[in-house]
Image: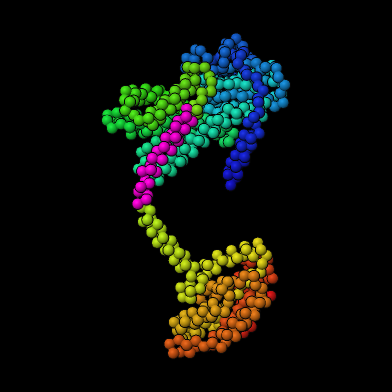
Amino acid sequence: MSRSTGLLGQCILFWGLVIFTLATQASDVTLSEGWQFRWGDSPVSADGSPAWAQGQDPRGWQAINFPSNPPGRDGNRHAWFKTTLPSEGSWRDPVLYIYSVDLLLEAYLEGQRHYRFGEFDADGQGHFAGWPWHMIELPPDFAGQPMYFRVYSDYTDIGLWGEIKIMERAELFGYVLRHSAIDLGISMICLLLALLTGVFTTIQPGKRHQLAPIALFSLASGSMILAETQASQLLIDAPLMWNYLAAGGYFLLPVALGLLVEQWYRDTRLRLIRRIWQLHLAYWVIALGAASLGWISLAITYPVFDGLLLMSLVLMAAIILPRLKTLDDEQKAILATHGVFSLLLIADMAVAHGLLPWGRVPVSAGALVFSIVIVVISLFEYKRTQQEFKALNLRLEQEVAQRTGELQTLIRRLEVYSYTDPLTGLYNRRYFTDILEKASAQAMRQQSPLTLVMIDIDHFKRINDQYGHEAGDYVLVNIASQLKQHFREADVICRLGGEEFAILLYHTEAGGVQQRTDELLDILSDTLHVHQGTTMGPITVSCGIASFPQHVDDPQALLGLADKALYSAKLAGRARSHVYT
């Protein structure tokens, strides 16, 4: 329960931030100059803190334009970066925002560790913990102070990455949400499309080979975009979880494309395309499985996949383009939009590996274009399918209507059986339970009287013992018939079981009901029951009466009160009716 409550609170906080900070314009200072770096890890001072963070050994630092991938790495896994925090600006709650880090980070201010991401061991190393954005709180007097960053990475890249800014904490949330809003919307569209096509896949098995790849592509792209959106970190602060979700979606994209394209061919190209997507599916299983088991770092699976994806895209283009004219317009539209999406993926890949300057590549826009094209094509496909099935539906309409009528008749019979006592034809206890609940709600809502009568046949066991169970059933049927004749058609008469009956009377108070039950007692006292030539009787009954709101504030309690009144009538000598007191 606590975990669910916490997640609900995070959702409320997230959407509150969306509403109140989406339009906020952030005033910030970008730290794009004055950086220095040095390779290796710092020696430790006598107090156990890194010597470099205290300004010792100042000769080893070199200038760098941006604290990422310095020259001359030569297998180094440790790098230090430093900058002097700017003095301009007036700040209330300043924070340092970093878009991402490869891979683990410690930040030092005034010689002390001020922030850490990831777990460093005694050798200053650690395991991949994800690629989140970072918010480092700054003291009010940070202006002009040197800040040091210790970075460890066994990845192809090392250092800080993307953007580094100083801004107000509240403005940072607005900044993140503004840059995430479009991607969030697109991811929701893709996931909704995945859901819809998944549903159509189940209800139209004949179209499964066409719809399943679309559902898989939409699911993979939607999951990837959502996981890579910075706003996801505001919802659930679990960077590694989001990276696994992003990797899972990213690695599945060529599988979905291969499944979509392979149905267009029936020659040797089919086998080649199938081998490509099967290879990617195997990579998805092996890479994510090995990473989740701790055999390899999830980070290292990305460069390998990027190379594999590039080769697959080139090979598929070589397979498809020579026979492009053989494809229909819908297939060409799908292929063209996926080509746009692939180019955006390649551009994003180039930025991630430092081949292009950093920038936000609109990968989600490619997914949106692809999704729109798929939706339009699916609508046309659905229209054609409807036209094809229209004639069949007309031929089957009469048969369906007939079967539906038979089914409805059967349902009505079953409903009657489920609520009817088979011996007496009265309603049974199940029906009584349902009607008491509904009648109680109505009486409470309208504040109208509701009275319940409990009736029990006196000495019924003697009748069974003396005359037999068939005679007892005969008496039950006769009593039930007399109850139906004596009470109003609007009154609900039920057999609760054995020799016990219950009558629910609307808009009636206890006094009037007792008069009617006394009349019933008089009628029964003059009635003889003849079964197979044997005369029985007269047979009497005892009655207990309780009424809302005269006796109780909750009509649901009438059953217990009427039962107590019935017990009182039994103790008083039977063959009488008692009102609850």
Query: Magenta segment: does it hold 377?
Result: yes
Query: Magenta segment: does it hold 11?
Result: no
Relative image position of residue 119 (x, y in whole percent): 55, 29
* Residue positioned 58% across, 36% down in the render: 235
Relative image position of residue 277 (x, y in whole percent): 36, 31
The residue lying furthest to the top in this view is 59
Judging depth in this view, the residue of 382 and 281 nearest the camera is: 382
* Quadrant occupied by the C terminus: bottom right
Q: Quadrant of residue 521?
A: bottom right
Q: Main secondary structure of the magenta part?
A: helix
Judging depth in this view, the residue of 348 and 524 nearest the camera is: 524
Taking the image as drawn, is residue 129 in sight?
A: no
Judging depth in this view, the residue of 292 and 121 nearest the camera is: 292
Judging depth in this view, the residue of 83 and 385 nearest the camera is: 385
Left/right of residue 539 with respect to residue 565 in the rendered view: left
Is 502 above or below relative to 202? below
Question: Which residues make up the magenta segment?
Answer: 366-395
Is 557 above or below relative to 370? below
